[in-house]
Amino acid sequence: MSKDVLNNARYLAAIVALQLQAENARHRHLVVLSGSRKWAVELAYEVIARLGVMQTLWLTDEPQCSTPEWEVEYSPAKKAIRHLGSERSLIVMDAYAGFHPDAFGAISGTLKAGGVFVLLTPEIDQWADYDDPDYERITSLPFARASLTRRFISHINDSISAAQSVLRISEQRGLCHLQNSLEGSIPSGAMTASEPLQSKGGDSSLTPDQQQAVEAICRVVTGHRRRPLVITSDRGRGKSAALGLAAAKLIKRGLSRIVLTAPLIASVESAFAMLEVQFPQGVRTGLGFSTQSGGDCEVIFIPPDELISATPDAELLLVDEAAAIPTPMLETLLVRYSRVVFASTIHGYEGTGRGFAVRFTKTLDQQTPQWRSVHLSSPIRWAENDPLEACVFDALLLNASPNEPIVSRQIDFTKLKTCWLDQDELLHNQTLLKQVFGLLVLAHYRTSPDDLRMLLDGPSLRVVAQFAGSDLVVVALLVREGGLERELGDAIWQGRRRPRGHLIPQVLSSMGGFHEATDLTGERVMRIAVHPSLHQLGLGAALIEEISRQGEHDGVDYIGSSFGATVELISFWQHVGFSPLRLGLQREAASGTHSLVVMRPISASAIALCKEAEQRFYDQFYFDLSGTFNSLSVDMVLRLLGSLEAEKWLLDKRDIADLVAFTEHFRVYESCSHVVAKLVILAATNNMLDSECTKPEAAVLIRRVVQKQTVSAVVSALHLAGKKELEQLLRSAVCKLFLRYQQPLSFS
Ligand SMILES: CC(=O)SCCNC(=O)CCNC(=O)[C@H](O)C(C)(C)COP(=O)(O)OP(=O)(O)OC[C@H]1O[C@@H](n2cnc3c(N)ncnc32)[C@H](O)[C@@H]1OP(=O)(O)O
């Protein structure tokens, strides 16, 4: 027998032994095959055959061969998210096709107890030199993929090598870990008492945590007081199943319509599975479940952005994976639905969860201080101390967190230390890396493992942070943009080319029409995050000042940013001297927000461009409010209208006569709507809508007069009794504003 065949036999025996241990302990394990692609792929097929696994999921862009005997489902890593609702007992990920950080994290959560995750990588000491195809996603001109650093891969490689529970097999070095498993001994910490897996079904199979959650959900509906519930858990604790069982119980007690929402329908699959078990006669449709074929009672899935725009009736709203939904959307749901449960993974593989607990609970404390919480800690899909979970969390820093601050709110601003952090320094100083990434995760709902790679390898990325003593209090990621070749600039302006990176120059040139934007160089603030316990103390503003000083020193033309626009963020960026230049036409599906490009110019050319682009933005903005932006929130419209120039909206004699006819006589609104609109804009530019009108009046003026929403849309959105109430609110608001207008010096 050849040496290779003998070796492979040893490796397979080790993997089989490990899988048996995993099965006995209800754990999952990571096996890494590091060597040539051909060797690793062939060994992986042998693993599938030896373990006798049907329906292996294999993440790759380039399936290597078809497998007649064993069914393998191939999927590109970038589409791994599609598989989130399913469960597998064997997953293969081919890092030769690209190591996709988010996919690695998310898909490992779909591996069942007793399962094995097989990662195929180049040889241990060559992986970090391999031109990983997935790095294409972070290239940016002039950096070609092959020229990028691969510190992230080094970090993953080191982390895997350091994890005692990983079985690593190298083509050149043989078995690197868990050698003792060959002899059938058990790696430390891997064996716990074997417990039966939770069966999909009724209450008896629930963990005590789940039972507590189901009871708490039922109390949200049956309690006399409005009491929102927050359920938090780690991945695999049966949170979604508990939502499904609670929904079933409530339907049995007489509820007829429950709405379930989550960023992805796949993540609530186990809630629907639970309903199917509870109502065997029920009918599953694409987006919902009816207890009987005729309809009767239903649990319906509605994506968050649709819920916000339509607000359908529901006796109970269940929000799953709430951490992946932006806080402003959650706040809207909290206001609109009286009985509501927010459930979320805190230590999720996607890395989005921990900030949720910090950010959203602040809102709950303010709006509904009587809210309750339940935490699910016992895993149901695998046993405690799962080796794969520990390894993935460590490698992707999903447990990272900034130091717990800090001498509470007493920061001595004169002693803050600004540090420009080197990406190499971050790689080699894991404590610092964890602090920085931990703060980004905590502060921003969409920070994911992909961002860890960006942090370590993003070309022309710079990291600046401020420390109070050894505590990180604020961090920003910056990326250099622009200064593009004229020929490329022309092609971008003409809409013929859209190279990766250079977001602000491209948006301003190809969409805003400012050809010169691609010539200028700018520093884009990709992310800025202040420790959540230290917001609104001036730390964010101070760091922006530091960034601007450095930008000036470096000779860049401007500092810019692009972010999902909320009223609070617009307020922050305007406060620190940035002008809005372009609002994205479409809402991002995940955040429900429009992205806003802002700029603080430094050079004379950027000052000229910024002035003109801002003017153009506002000129266009008013017209877009009755079209593209006619569903923009009232607060956001008010915020942006506040910066319009009042002179363009001054009223002439005839306008004033029209307003007299409307407010004092019987002129109908429709015949003078354009003049009413002028008055409203004029008032908004003087920030008088808030001070002169009640909230419902201001909302009617913005929606009906400025955004030209239909009467029925306004009535429904503002929960008015009907057209009459709308007309009364409109008339009373216009009367107040007109009266104020007639007072000397009240409008500038
Ligand atoms: C490109 C991007 O990264 S955009 C995403 C920004 N980051 C995040 O959303 C993460 C979470 N949030 C944060 O980290 C912080 O709140 C930041 C970075 C937005 C702001 O930093 P902070 O230190 O809290 O703000 P700072 O105290 O410097 O505020 C300066 C001014 O901005 C405005 N402002 C700041 N936060 C708010 C807010 N929540 N609501 C209204 N206005 C605000 C105010 O005018 C404030 O001045 P004032 O306090 O004198 O009224």
Image (cartoon, grey):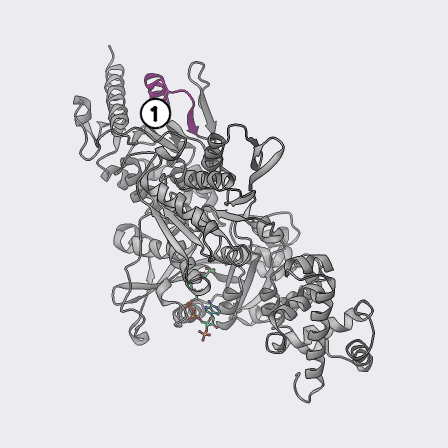
Q: Residue at x 69, y 63 (%)?
A: 707
Q: Quadrant of residue 717?
A: bottom right
Dividing the picture into quadrants, the one containing residue 545 is bottom left
Mark 1 neighbour class, 10 Å CA radius: few under 14, some 14 to 19, many 20 or more = many
Residue at the far top in the pictured view: 1
Ligand 1's quadrant: bottom left
Image quadrant containing the C terminus:
bottom right
Main secondary-structure element of the magenta-colored stretch:
helix
Residue 552 highlighted magenta (yes or no): no
Q: Give the range drawn in magenta.
A: 40-59
| Relative side of 306 to 667, left or right | left
Residue 286 point in image, percent of width and height? 58, 34
Local secondary structure at mark 1? helix
Quarter containing the N terminus: top left
Q: Which residue is drawn at 76% across and 79% down?
A: 651
Residue 49 is a magenta residue: yes
Q: Is residue 715 left or right of residue 146?
A: right
Ligand 1 within 8 Å, label 1 CB: no
Q: Indicate the position of residue 93 as horizontal and vertical percent values.
A: 39, 31
* Residue receiving disc 1: 40
113 or 209: nearer the viewer: 209
Relative depth, front residue between 372 and 711: 372
- Percent of width and height locating residue 115: 33, 28
* 607 shown above or below 280: below
Establish if 734 lies above or below 424.
below
The answer to whether any part of residue 63 appears in the image is no
Of the residues shown, which amino acid type is indicated by label 1? Ala
682 in relation to 616, above or below: below
